[in-house]
Structure formats: structure tokens, C-alpha cells
Amino acid sequence: MNPNMKTPTKRNTADDTLAGEALALMNATAEMAGERVGEIRKRLAAALESGGEMVDDLEEKVLKKAKETDKAIHRNPYEALGIAVGFGVVIGAFIGCWSTRCASTGK
């Protein structure tokens, strides 16, 4: 396994743009009275918490799959190299066809 592979860290949701804006909105409405404002603030807080949990779960799944992929590549390096070369050839062929077609049509 690659020793340089980082493990996931818990993110501070205030650092994320959308979550940061939502928290700023919650702080701005903290002084406001009213049943409707309180209800909206509770729903927003629940959504932020749920979203953070979903992102954390997704990070864990992605890291697990990345580690599995890393192990598979180390177990089968020649197969992994063959697959990578194959994808490179296919992508190169598409780019080559696209560039010659565009060059011949003048686009």
C-alpha cells in the first residue's frame, strides 16, 4: 500500500462555502424571534448535520476503494499497466480521430 496515501480527516463544515453561508445565515437569524424562523433554523441545522455525515461516509467509502485499488495494482502490476496502456490507446485514437476530423472540416 502507498504510504503517502492520506487518511480522511474530519472537515470543519464552516470551511465549506455552502455550509459556511448556511452557518452565517443561522448566526444572523439567531436574534430573530418567531416560530417560523425557529423552525427554519432547526431544519437548516439538521440538513447541515445530515449533509456532513453523508460527506464523511462518502469519504470513508472512497478511501476504502482507493486502498483496495492500490492493493490490486500492487498484486497485479502488469495487468494494471496493460489496462492503463489500453485506455491510453483508446483515448489517443479518439483524440486523433477528432483532431483530424476537425482539421479536415476547418472547425
Image (cartoon, rainbow, N blue to C red):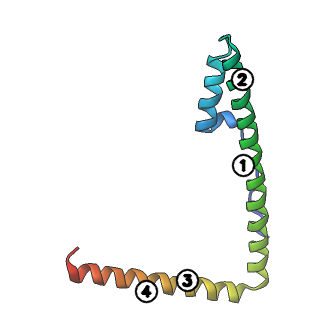
| Alpha carbon distance from label 3 to label 4 | 10 Å
Q: Tag on residue 55?
A: 1
Quote the CA–CA distance across marks 2 and 3: 52 Å
User: Across the whole image, how many numbered discs are drawn on residues?
Assistant: 4
Q: Which residue is mark 2?
A: 39
Q: Residue furthest front?
A: 36
**Callout 2 secondary element:** helix
Nearer to us of marks 4 and 1 is 1
Image location (x, y in percent) of residue 76: 75, 86
Q: Residues within 10 Å of mark 1 (few under 14, many from 20)?
A: few
SS assignment at label 1: helix
Which of the two labelled residues, at mark 3 and mark 1, occupies the earlier sequence position?
1
User: Would you call the spot at circle 4 few (<14 residues within 10 Å), some (14-19), or many (20 or more)?
Assistant: few
SS label for mark 4: helix
Instruction: Report the residue marked by disc 3.
Output: 87
Circle 4 is placed at which residue position? 93
Type of amino acid under label 2: Glu
The disc, 2 or 3, on the residue closer to the chain's N-terminal end is 2
Q: Position of residue 64 (x, y in %)?
A: 79, 64
Identify the residue at horizontal 29%, vertical 83% (top origin).
101
Quadrant where the C terminus sits is bottom left
Instruction: Please state if 95 lies on the left or on the right of 67 as rendered.
Output: left
- Residue at 79%, 71% in the rendered image: 68
Q: Amino acid at mark 1?
A: Val
